[in-house]
Amino acid sequence: MRRIVFVLVAVVALAGVVVYMAPASGQADGEAAPIFGVKIPPGYRDWRLISVAREEVDLDDIRAILGNDVAIKAYREGTRPFPDGTIIARIAWAYLPSAENNKAFGKVQSFVAGRPKNGVQFMVKDSRKYASTGGWGYSQFDDGKPLTDQAMLQSCFACHQPVKDRDFVFTRYAP
Amino acid sequence: MRRIVFVLVAVVALAGVVVYMAPASGQADGEAAPIFGVKIPPGYRDWRLISVAREEVDLDDIRAILGNDVAIKAYREGTRPFPDGTIIARIAWAYLPSAENNKAFGKVQSFVAGRPKNGVQFMVKDSRKYASTGGWGYSQFDDGKPLTDQAMLQSCFACHQPVKDRDFVFTRYAP
């Protein structure tokens, strides 16, 4: 018992260190999103790039999908379902025309990333913990604060159903 | 002398390993681009993300700008001019509507990255070697082959002149 307590204290202490270091490379705080209990993974802004995308209409952003080491390895090796420990991050920014770039190109054609927009989203793979939602926990953080609309979070799984045969992940790796 | 040969063989062997491993994480071969002599930096596809952009008209792509460790550190700390050793990579893909995503969103709004397109470009900082072009060497590789159009490469520096006050770099870091 004493040993278990020691291990727990050590784990909590380490977790504290990780959270403390995080702000240098991406938003992070200790608050967990409801339902799935996902927290912002420290250092996610340093993760490698899976792909990019553009959403028009209401979202009106340009976005990047990043993966932790487990995710990148699984993508490159074609491992499906994704192994436990996989985390996929979606970051996004305002979609802004660039007068500066247009001038350099001599054509009106260029759009760049502006301020962060539409929060940060994470899919976390834990096949046992999230067994009832295809093995994935979902979360969104706006300015570091977790989305608390439980109906919205519950809808993530339903929305990802059409790509069940790709382990519920929409984004393909961009080589 | 024998020792020097041994070291050279070891270096060449290691270089071979690097080149051999490179395709897993980005195109790479030994050919250098003309004028600036830039080669494809091994492992650039693993570099961290600086920002993303979209180019319409002829280029018609969606792109990501990645930086090596020196570049990312300089961006985050606001170091200008960028230190020697900075390398900035521009990768790009075809800009494709995603029927799959549109269906999930319930709106026609989604564009994703398709096949690699418009080659891979690198800006390499070496303030002495490239003193005559603002400290930067420029290169482009299409399917791993360097662009050999010398006039086109020469034009890179002229085109980057408008952002001389940002050390000739157009892309801003996307937080």
Image (cartoon, coloured by chain):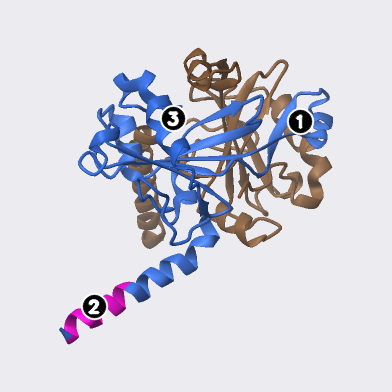
Chain colours: A brown, B blue
Give the magenta range.
Answer: B2-11
The crowding category of the residue bearing disc 1, from other C-alpha atoms within 10 Å (few below 14, some 14 to 19, many at least 20), is few
Question: Mark 2 and mark 1: span between their CA atoms?
Answer: 60 Å
Chain letter belonging to callout 2: B
> Marks 3/1: CA distance?
24 Å
Q: Is residue B120 above or below residue B112?
A: below
Residue A85 visible in the displayed image = no
> Which of labels 3 and 2 is toward the front?
2
Question: In the displayed structure, would residue B10 be above or below residue A24?
Answer: below
- Residue placed most toward the observer, B41 or B109: B41
Numbered disc in front, either 2 or 1: 2
Q: Give the residue pinned by disc 3.
A: A27
For badge 3, the amino acid type reads Gln
Q: Chain of mark 1?
A: A
Crowding at label 2, few (<14), some or many (≥20) Cα neighbours within 10 Å? few
Q: Residue at x 42, y 32 (%)?
A: B156
Residue A147 spot, x, y in % from top left: 60, 24
Q: Identify the residue at the far bottom of this view.
A: B2
Marks 2/1 same chain: no
| Alpha carbon distance from label 3 to label 2 | 46 Å
For residue B8: magenta?
yes
Q: Is residue B164 in the magenta section?
A: no
